[in-house]
Amino acid sequence: MQIENCSRWFGNVVAVNDVTMTIGPGITGLLGPNGAGKSTLIHMLAGFLPPSAGTVTLDGGPVWKNHDVYRTIGIVPEREATYDSLTGRQFVLASAELHGLDDAGAAASRALATVAMEDAAHRRIGEYSKGMKQRVKMASALVHDPAVLLLDEPFNGMDPRQRLHLIELLREMGAEGRTVLFSSHILEEVEQLASQIEVLIAGRYAASGDYREIRRLMTDRPHQYTVISSDNRMLAAALVADASTAAVRLNGDALHVDASEFLRFAELLPLVARDAGIRLFEVTPADESLESVFAYLVEK
Amino acid sequence: MNRTVLRLTAQAMLGGRRVLLVSAMAVILIGLALLVRLIGDISEPDIAAFLQVVSLATLMPLFGLIVGTGTIGPEIDDGSIIHLLSKPVPRPVIIHSKLVVAIVATVAFAVVPTALAALIMGASGSLALALAVGSLAAGAVYCVMFMLLAILTRHAVIIGLGYALIWESLVGSLVPGARNLSVQQWALAVTDALASPGLITANVGLVLAVTLIIGGFVAATWYAGSRLRVLTLATDD
């Protein structure tokens, strides 16, 4: 799938701003904080929203106003709404029929087995938990064996066991050479699964690469810490002697440290404290919110 | 047409409160007819006048509004339409299938009860048939018109009510020219043509009425299909 110079605005609000990326076979994670434009981008990739500028294509053909692309694409939307009065099986069977599959019943059974929902398939979707709804949506998206799978925040509402199961399933699909794109606002979730990560922040394309590269970008940045120790003044002197510490400030019982290199500082702090005979009571990151991490990436 | 879309639409319609509402409307119509019949004999012109007001002018637009918007509006509102739109089914086929469900529901819950009510009150077979055909024409146009509105706007019910109450009832009674654009008047013209002379009063000529019924139905069906093709879905961003 190719996204070229793609923008989407709603009135005065720009949701996606001049994004260009190529999504190829394997697993790609679309990472960004809430409201970054991930869902808008996935909607454009899925053909539910035309770009205000730029193009979105699948194998060179447009996805907007082209219902035939759904023979190739499977979609797991973020919104929970389904046909709640249907049973899980009826819902997946309907999907198989709408795809015009020869043996819709067998395809539905296979898809339900893939997401381990056979036992609950006879129950109405309205009675399902959020995680079960997510799995039945997944079965519906997989029923026609698509080459491309788009998932919008697929792990939302899943318990750890269901999460592991979905991770395994997506890994298998990626290994089979399918193109799998999923969005998430949690780095750990994305790095567990995706070989390729695309970071979207405030509608803009912020970074791209494998998870090690993104992790390095996110962790090896200036960090602020509040440290409480048995001797803050001595600790401050010892820390500031190293290049990984940009600044120290004593404030009452606490020591505020600006570390310029996270990884080096993380190794340095316990060593310095041990060598100086200082006990560390508390080390608190002061700017670890996801927003601050993303804000740093945007600046960079 | 697509059988799966037919089934899903019918299940959604029969499974919700909407079916109770349309059933209640049919029961009220039959109940009123029984009540009138029990009170005493009623002449054919009075039966025609009664059903013209109760069925064609009141029941049909409300019914069309409930069924027409109900076949697609709730799916668009809650976003579940995404499951239908993410399938390789041509959008006009989705519209045609949903429209068939709406028209079958109209026949079952409005057209047949209208004819039954006429017969219960002692109307002739020809008047009952005329009313049935007239209400079917009105119901079909209302259904597709309100289905189109539900695709175009989230305020379809309010706009539809405005059309039925303000345009057809108020403006239509004060401005004669407005009656040319009244589904109710088109249906009355058809009913008038089939019933015995003098029973029904229509303000629109038959040719114009039939042209507008067919033209309106075809145009609205086509436009609904093309609008569904470019329907954009709201995202959480």
Image (cartoon, rainbow, N blue to C red):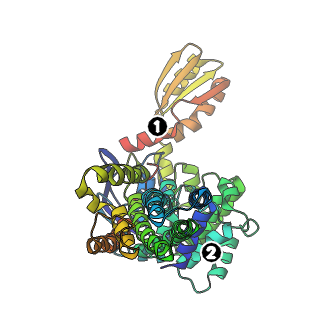
**Tags 1 and 2 in contact by the CB under 8 Å rule?**
no
Q: Which residue is mark 2?
A: A93
* Above or below, comparing residue A132 to residue B112 in the picture: above
Front in this rendered view, residue A60 or A85: A85
What is the secondary structure assignment of the residue under circle 2?
helix
Give the x, y percent position of residue A289: 52, 37
Q: CA distance from mark 1 to mark 2?
A: 45 Å
**Amino acid type of the residue tagged 1 in the rendering:** Ser
Asked if residue A120 lies left or right of residue B119, the reply is right
User: Which image quarter is the C terminus of chain A in?
Assistant: top left
**Amino acid type of the residue tagged 2 in the rendering:** Leu
Q: Which residue is mark 1?
A: A292
Name the residue located 61 percent from the left edge and 29 percent from the top edge: A283
The reply to whether residue B172 is visible in this rendering is: yes
Q: Residue lying furthest left in this view?
A: B177
Along the polypeptide, which appears first: circle 1 or circle 2? 2
What is the secondary structure assignment of the residue under circle 1?
helix
Front in this rendered view, residue B92 or B148: B148
Front in this rendered view, residue A14 or B48: B48
Q: Quadrant of residue B21?
A: bottom right
Q: Respond whether the residues carrying marks 1 and 2 are from the same subunit.
A: yes
Name the residue located 55 percent from the left edge and 48 percent from the top edge: A186
Q: The numbered mark 1 sits on a residue in which chain? A: A
* Above or below, comparing residue A170 to residue A284 in the picture: below
The reply to whether residue B86 is visible in this rendering is: no
Name the residue located 39 percent from the left edge and 71 percent from the top edge: B191
